[in-house]
Amino acid sequence: MIPVPSGVRVWLAVGRTDMRRGMNGLALQVQEALGRDPFVGDLFVFRGARGDLIKILWHDGLGLSLYAKRLERGRFVWPPSVSALSASPRPPEEHAISISAAQLAYLLSGIDWRNPVHTFRPERAG
């Protein structure tokens, strides 16, 4: 698990990302497509077209880090792409949504971060 410090913002890049991109390519995408600075300490999360792989870009004050996670089964829950939201062009700030660190933990666990529900119900003891 990524040690997310308190006060760090987590941004989901809406839509699909080319997962062949590395650290520099994703940092460039943060600057150009999202209109944000990749070196301020925020976490930027990207998902590929298949939905089973995400990459997280994070600058911790010392250097840029790139984390990746692939699900063995299922897909990561992701917001719809910008084109699916509306036909009008949107400013770069709307190509990403902000989520909490707790929602990121759900996302990394493969749980629907938008509405987490307990799926396990213990049987009554006794």
Image (cartoon, helix red, strand yellow):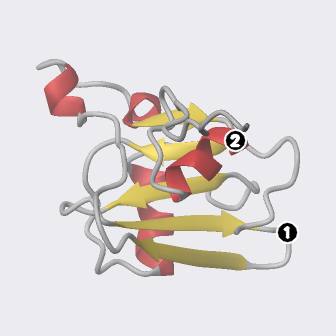
Q: Which mark is residue 47?
A: none
Q: Residue at x 30, y 65 (%)?
A: 52
Residue 48 % position (x, y): 27, 63
Q: Depth check: 23 or 109 in front?
A: 109
Q: Which residue is mark 1?
A: 61
Q: Check disc 2 and give the amino acid type.
A: Ala
Residue 63 % position (x, y): 76, 79
**Helix, strand or loop under label 2:** helix
Q: Depth check: 28 or 57 in front?
A: 57
- Of tags 2 and 1, the one toward the viewer is 2
Q: Is residue 64 left or right of residue 22?
A: right
Q: Where the C terminus falls, by quadrant? A: top right
Q: Check disc 1 and give the amino acid type.
A: Gly
Q: Which mark is residue 102?
A: 2
Residue 84 position by quadrant: top left
Residue 61 position by quadrant: bottom right
Q: Residue at x 54, y 65 (%)?
A: 56
Q: Residue at x 78, y 46 (%)?
A: 8
Q: Badge 2: how crowded within 10 Å, few (<14), some, or many (20+)?
A: few
Q: CA distance from mark 2 to mark 1?
A: 22 Å
Q: Where the N terminus falls, by quadrant? A: bottom right
Q: Depth check: 106 or 43 in front?
A: 106
